[in-house]
Amino acid sequence: MRKSWLLLVAAAAVAGCSDSDKVTPSQDPQSSAPPQLEQKSEAEEARDPWQVVESFEVGRDVYVRSLALEPETNSLWVGTSVGVHEVDLATQGLRNTYTRAEGLANEYVFAIFVDSHGNKWFGTNGGGASRLNNGQWQTYFPMHGLADYWVYSFGEQSNGDVWIGTWDGVNHWDAQTGKLTTYVQELINEWVYGIDVDSKDRVWFGTEGGVSMFDGRSWRSWTHNDGLGAPNDENLPISFNTGLGTRSRHDLNVLTGGEPTYNPNYVFSIHVDRNGDVWAGTWGGGVARYDGRRWRNYNMKAGLAGNIVYSIAESADGTMWFGTDRGVSRFDGKAWHNYGREQGLLNEHVYALAVVPGDEVWAGTRGAVSRLALSKADDGQAETQQEAGKGSEIQ
């Protein structure tokens, strides 16, 4: 069992440290730091109690693609491009490492989900889905009814049924029978990146063609024509070095040889907040918020750190967190607070987020997992803050 994957490095924004005590994280030589926000409010550089306090390196070329909490064991599950790590949150030490040798179907893990029965679900890059229950592994392939070998997301309904998002539709897993049912034509697009379930047990899907929702009887979908995703004139490069996994026919669709790759319908992450609003993170269009009547979009002009939103999480008090291509954004309903390299992140492409109740947020990037914490003392280290814009609407 390997235990050398975590190398603690002090981040630049440790609360209470003097300047001489701080260690600046090393820069990734293969990537340049993105430009700073051009739009800044009068509250720029305002003091804030949240700090990036430390980072755990996992290897420069290792991607941390998924994070999941298991409150019953106080564990943080970390899915990477080389396997899965189970971390003890109390000690921040490594409990277990899982690879193919331990039963994982594929070591490149896109998604981790802990269901209400304690099952750990793992979605992989070309290896199907794995489920770990009481030390026993079960693997699902298309021969077992899985829609595809590429599994990107999970969600659970109140009865324990689990939805599995793949790059060729979604599966409904019946918790009582274990039967898998596939849905493809019902979706706006078969490439499913995000799943969440609201308080009415409606299932929301973020796809490469927009948002779809299933209420148990019928399906409904939304696209940019309905207001999803802010306009963006930028040419957004997509390369094989994004950590998004590989699949030939998919890469041919998005690697367009210099053509603009912005797609407001490309929903990479989705989250239903405690008020029932649906947040959809897009590839280039920022994050869109649906209140049941209309979509409102937030992008860099409104205060979001970056317009590509890989991940979304929520604190118990309703604070929203977004992992973007330019760092982490925190939105408290009034102002945006952004955290990047200058605040201690080792890499600004934040693929995964996990919120620990109370005062911790974990962020997964290329090469590291960083921990943000609520500091009791304000030592003057400030993140970039921008007062919240109203967002944009597309009628």
Image (cartoon, rainbow, N blue to C red):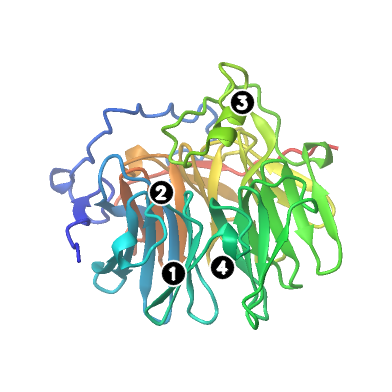
Along the polypeptide, which appears first: circle 3 or circle 1?
A: 1
In front: label 2 or label 4: 4
* Mark 1 lies on residue: 69
In front: label 2 or label 3: 3
Circles 2 and 3 in contact, beta carbons < 8 Å: no
Along the polypeptide, which appears first: circle 2 or circle 1?
A: 2
* Mark 4 lies on residue: 317
Left or right side of 313 for 333: right
Along the polypeptide, which appears first: circle 2 or circle 4?
A: 2
- Above or below, 24 relative to 331: above
Q: Mark 3: which amino acid?
A: Thr
Q: Position of residue 122 (x, y in %)?
A: 47, 62
Q: Position of residue 65 (x, y in %)?
A: 43, 50
- Above or below, 90 relative to 354: below
Circles 4 and 1 in contact, beta carbons < 8 Å: no
Instruction: Measure the alpha-carbon separation of dots 3 and 1.
Output: 33 Å
